[in-house]
Amino acid sequence: MIMGTILPAALVSFGVTAFVGLFLIPKLRKMKAGQSIREDGPVWHMSKQGTPTMGGIMFIIGIAVAILTIGFPAIVDGRLGHVIVFGFAFVYAVIGFLDDYEKVKKKQNLGLTTSQKLLLQLVVAIVLVLILRLQGFLSPDLYVPFVGITLFLNEVVYFIFAAFVIVGTVNAVNITDGVDGLVSGVTLPVAICYGALAVHWGVAYAELGLFAGALIGGLLAFLIYNFNPAKVFMGDTGSLFLGGAVCGLAFAMNVPLVLIPLGVVYIAEVMSDVIQMVYYKATGGKRFFKMAPLHHHFEMGGWSGKKWKEKKVFFVFSLVSAIFAVIAFLSVSMR
């Protein structure tokens, strides 16, 4: 029964996303909505200067159409899990769009200030948790993957924990978006894991499975345009949407700690940035990684000295994500 909505949602999202891309990319080029490449990044990335950004709009539209068509009967019945998660991810996409717009307008790789983004993201995170709590999707209790025990937390403590996890994960997903197709390839196994959990847990998770299916279809279609060499980038519009979707599903399914194994690539990426900054300050200017975040380190030759092409980074990181998606599924499937 659940597969009867996941697969159609994936197909609709795939078709709409692919179709929208045919028109959106030329429109973005006409608007001169080109990406400004960070000057301290790998020198070969400078050839991407001017590639259209904000392409995440296409899979956001595809997912929205899937939710409003395949998910319409559930909406009529008042089952709104997929709508809530989409709304949460969409608000993050709006924050990303404002950031992208500022970058395009000023023609530099700087958008909203860090404090502006964090404040907006924090507010959205708290609102999501409050809505999910009021709608009965989650409790202030934490199911611990692998060990199968539940930790009972105070409501206030849970809200603080949730806000920290959501903002951290959303930004980790955003940081992962630095190589053609990378964040899409890494997030696909994550979405598949959520869809598999929805099928495994049954009808109560049907709407969340539908959203996961729509996410899968949208990302697959986006890779048609974003796989190396990319014709378009998703921008913060797309990457913050994905971060919101990944977090939204984890909390809506009431297993936020699954993000630890499931988001291992995101965590590695953001931790590489943290380690680089701490090591740089502690050693007076030395670098632990050749360049952070982690995907750039391997592009620059990693520890072996042999440079990885973008496609190799894409496939290796996506494979790691897929392996840990299986581990994540097994870690909570018996809840």
Image (tube, rainbow, N blue to C red):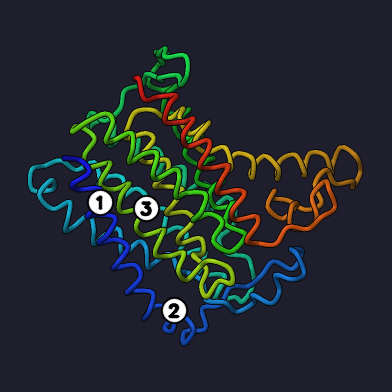
The mark found on residue 312 in the picture is none
Q: Is mark 2 on a helix, strand or loop?
A: helix
Could you tell me the amino acid type at mark 1? Leu
Percent position of residue 192, x then y: 38, 44
Q: Dividing the image into 4 quarters, which one contains the N terminus?
A: top left
Label 1 crowd bin: few (<14), some (14–19), many (20+), radius 10 Å: many
Of the two numbered discs 1 and 3 on the same chain, state the one appearing first in sequence. 1
Judge by depth and name the residue closer to the eye, 184 or 167: 184
Report which residue position mark 2 lands on: 25
**Relative side of 222 to 182, left or right:** left
Judge by depth and name the residue closer to the eye, 223 or 141: 223
Residue drawn at 41 percent across, 22 percent down: 156
Q: Distance between the residues labelled 1 and 3?
A: 9 Å
Residue drawn at 11 percent across, 42 percent down: 78
Could you tell me the amino acid type at mark 2? Ile
Q: Is mark 3 on a helix, strand or loop?
A: helix
Percent position of residue 190, x then y: 44, 43
Compared to residue 197, the image places residue 242 above or below, namely below
- Disc nearest the viewer among 2 and 3: 3
Q: What element carries label 1?
A: helix
Report which residue position mark 3 lands on: 216
Q: How far apart are marks 2 and 1 (CA)?
A: 27 Å
Judge by depth and name the residue closer to the eye, 247 or 180: 180
- Disc nearest the viewer among 2 and 1: 1
Percent position of residue 280, x then y: 84, 44
Report which residue position mark 1 lands on: 7
